[in-house]
Amino acid sequence: MITTVTLNAAIDQVYEMNSFVMGQTNRVMQKFQQGGGKGINVARVIKALDGDVLIGGFIGGLNGEKIKASLQEQRLPTSFIQIEGESRICLTVTDYQTKEMTELLEEGPTIQPHEWKKMLRWVEVQAESSEYLVLSGSLPKGLPPNAYATIIHLLKQKGVRVTLDTSGEALKQGIEAIPFAIKPNEDEISQLIGKPVEKQEDLIQAGEKLRDLGIEHVCFSLGEKGALFINSTGIYQVNAPKINVVNTVGSGDAFLAGLIYKLSQGASDEEAYRWAVACGSVNAGEKEIAKVQKESVESLLKELQITNVKVR
């Protein structure tokens, strides 16, 4: 089974508008709402691919109840830890005229020490039935920067393959715990190496250093440029398919879901990499966040080619 953990879960709310102008009254054409957060998005896509998945994390207050109810309506299995604080709302505003998307992300609740201890006990229990565990998203207030690293160390001792998708100090310290896979973007890599990523060779050099630490899959999603994957056998590039981009929010989560789903099915690394790009691309063509249909993914795979650009 695959377990996803979202420590800062949210209500994902999307406003669709003909135009969005700062400082003026803007009228919403359509509104869409669902339980979200990066780990939840990953789980939603894995479920759509017919994978066996469980959603965990923190929820609290009325927003937490809405998150849980939304996921239950979608028949997504959950095992949340209730907290005293109120779960957050993340708002995406889509402007049809400019095709631009603006995100407004609340900071979220403050986690209490006893709530964090409950989470660590929960993680230990889930390790007994989880082959893969995905840690995604920002850390809520109240947790130390090494929170993800603590979970990674705990799970590695039990043989669980842990994937990490976060940013900042949480990513830096999480990497030091040597997760199974990571998916940093270019900005996050720039922070890690202390300089801007100006060309693909910069990514490759950074990725090789991360691989040499012991991380089995270093994944870079590059949007319209496709994706770059670095593992012990080489450096693989997958082209980006031609799609009508509608909403890119959640595409990185769908990318990660496709990767872990296929690896959990025993697929080769190359096949899993192609599924990652296909899932991220299908999501980008949908209005809804983390919206993927398996048939669409399988159809898009025909357009994807993978090349080993550097054999190790």
Image: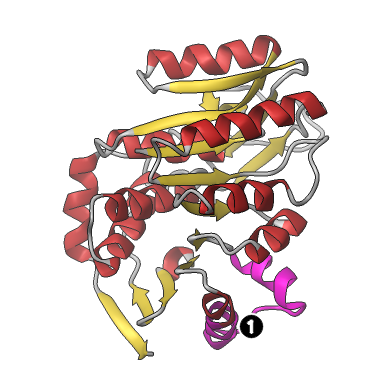
Q: Is 91 placed left or right of 243 in the picture?
A: right
Helix, strand or loop at mark 1: loop
* Viewer-proximal residue among 30 and 284: 284
| Magenta segment, prevailing SS (helix, strand or loop) | helix
**Residue found 72% across the figure and 46% down from its top:** 147
Give the extent of the magenta segment. Answer: 185-208
Please check the rendered image and state whether residue 206 is part of the magenta-colored stretch, yes or no. Answer: yes
* Viewer-proximal residue among 79 and 254: 79
Report x, y in % for residue 116. Answer: 73, 31
**Residue found 64% across the figure and 64% down from its top:** 175
Q: Is residue 235 visible?
A: yes
Residue 144 vs 305, above or below: the answer is above
**Residue found 43% across the figure and 73% down from its top:** 228
Q: To which residue does mark 1 refer?
A: 198
Residue closest to the far front: 157
Report x, y in % for residue 259. Answer: 36, 55
Report x, y in % for residue 269. Answer: 30, 67
Report x, y in % for residue 27. Answer: 64, 22
Please check the rendered image and state whether residue 295 is part of the magenta-colored stretch, yes or no. Answer: no
Q: Is residue 110 visible?
A: no
Circle 1 residues within 10 Å: few <14, some 14–19, many ≥20: few
